[in-house]
Image (tube, rainbow, N blue to C red):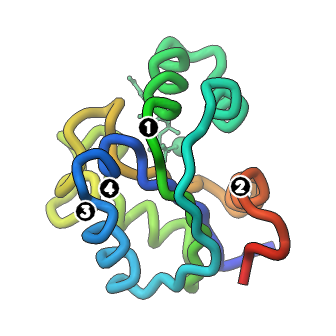
Amino acid sequence: MTTNRTFTMIKPDAVANGHIGAILNDITAAGFKIVAMKYTQLSAEKAGEFYAVHKERGFYGDLVSFMSSGPIVAAILEKDNAIEDFRKLIGATNPAEAAEGTIRQKYAKSIDANAVHGSDSDENAQIEGSFYFTAFERF
Ligand code: RTP
Ligand code: MG
């Protein structure tokens, strides 16, 4: 089922560097509607749970400690073709390879501190949105 929704986080680096407003502006200017949003910080345990799919990867420990290092903005976004269009808007995982004008190209410094998360499938968008938001917090 296509839900036309994706899930995003503005990661600790982009929050610390003062890019929340600019990134939300880019997201809404690209036609995404915010249907849930919160400002929060993950514990290491919760970050480990969120990224459990990467448990066996070499970067998992660094990823978990980075994602729990400071506050983040979590949001559910709605738009036709949301998953694909949002991944296009944020650009490649490594900002050095991200296309001109993408969020990671503009605001990210490294593959570890890459400014934003975007879901990679409808199924994961649903799981990730439910990780942060109850039914009463989604509109
Ligand atoms: P995200 O899940 O955060 O939107 O990023 P992504 O889909 O573009 O990349 P993914 O493969 O899901 O990896 C999750 C995060 O792990 C870090 N990573 N480091 N050193 C590395 O080779 C490496 N590969 C991935 C990145 O910070 C990536 O966002
Ligand atoms: Mg991913």
Residue 66 percent across, percent down from the top left: 44, 28
Decide which of tag 2 and tag 3 comes sooner along the chain: 3
* Distance in Å between CA atoms under marks 1 and 4: 23 Å
Q: Secondary structure at mark 3?
A: loop
Callouts 3 and 4 close, C-beta under 8 Å = yes
Quadrant of the snapshot with the C terminus: bottom right
Tag in front: 1 or 3:
1
Give the amino acid type for the residue marked by disc 3 in the picture.
Answer: Thr
Quadrant position of ligand 2: top right
Quadrant of the snapshot with the N terminus: bottom right
Give residue 132's mark. Answer: 2
Decide which of tag 1 and tag 4 comes sooner along the chain: 1
Residue 121 percent across, percent down from the top left: 65, 57
Q: Secondary structure at mark 1?
A: loop
Closer to us: 16 or 89 = 16
Give residue 10's mark. Answer: none
Give the amino acid type for the residue marked by disc 2 in the picture.
Answer: Tyr
* Distance in Å between CA atoms under marks 4 and 2: 24 Å
Closer to us: 12 or 76 = 12
Residue at 31% from the left image edge and 33% from the top image edge: 111
Give residue 91's mark. Answer: 4
- Mark 3 nearby-residue class (10 Å; few <14, some 14–19, many ≥20): some
* Distance in Å between CA atoms under marks 1 and 2: 16 Å
Tag in front: 2 or 3:
2
* Distance in Å between CA atoms under marks 2 and 3: 25 Å
In terms of image quadrants, where is residue 125? bottom right
